[in-house]
């Protein structure tokens, strides 16, 4: 745990590519840390349905999470700093959560 931060990881000097996943990965405070970022844009109704169908978290938890995340998204607009924006609307045939 580097610098006492829970969840930190060590990245080997030999790593050529490192993926950092999550809405906060393009937060304005860390935007300069990355060579490139990708924003996956998905309709909120579709994203909510997929989360519920995954069955990992109960709908009430997802709704509470989104109630906190939506103001962050509206204020920070992380997609505005993305190198590339892709659609998360379609899922390849033969995969789940479509």
Image (cartoon, rainbow, N blue to C red):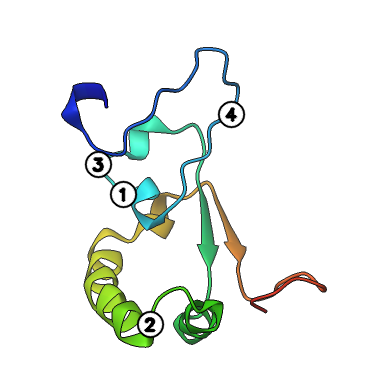
Give how far across and how far down residue 29 sits, in percent. 25, 41
Is the residue under label 1 in contact with that under label 3 (CB below 8 Å)? yes
Find the distance from the CA under tag 3 to the CA under tag 1: 5 Å
Is the residue under label 2 in contact with that under label 4 (CB below 8 Å)? no
Residue drawn at the location 38% of the way across and 57% of the way down: 23
Q: Secondary structure at mark 2?
A: loop
Check the image and report above or below for 8 versus 45.
above
Judged by depth in the image, the label closer to the viewer, 4 or 3, is 4
Q: Secondary structure at mark 1?
A: loop
Is the residue under label 1 in contact with that under label 2 (CB below 8 Å)? no
- Residue under label 3: 29
- Residue under label 1: 27
Find the distance from the CA under tag 2 to the CA under tag 3: 31 Å
- Count every numbered label the image shows and give the total: 4
- Residue under label 4: 17
Q: Secondary structure at mark 3?
A: loop
């Amino acid at each position: 745990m580097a610098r006492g931060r829970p969840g930190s990881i060590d990245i080997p000097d030999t790593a050529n590519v490192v993926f950092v996943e999550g809405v906060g990965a393009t937060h304005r405070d860390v935007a300069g840390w990355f060579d490139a970022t990708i924003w996956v844009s998905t309709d909120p109704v579709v994203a909510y349905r997929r989360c519920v169908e995954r069955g990992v978290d109960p709908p009430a938890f997802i709704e509470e999470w989104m109630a906190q995340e939506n103001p962050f998204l509206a204020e920070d607009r992380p997609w505005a700093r993305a190198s590339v924006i892709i659609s998360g609307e379609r899922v390849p045939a033969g995969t789940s959560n479509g």
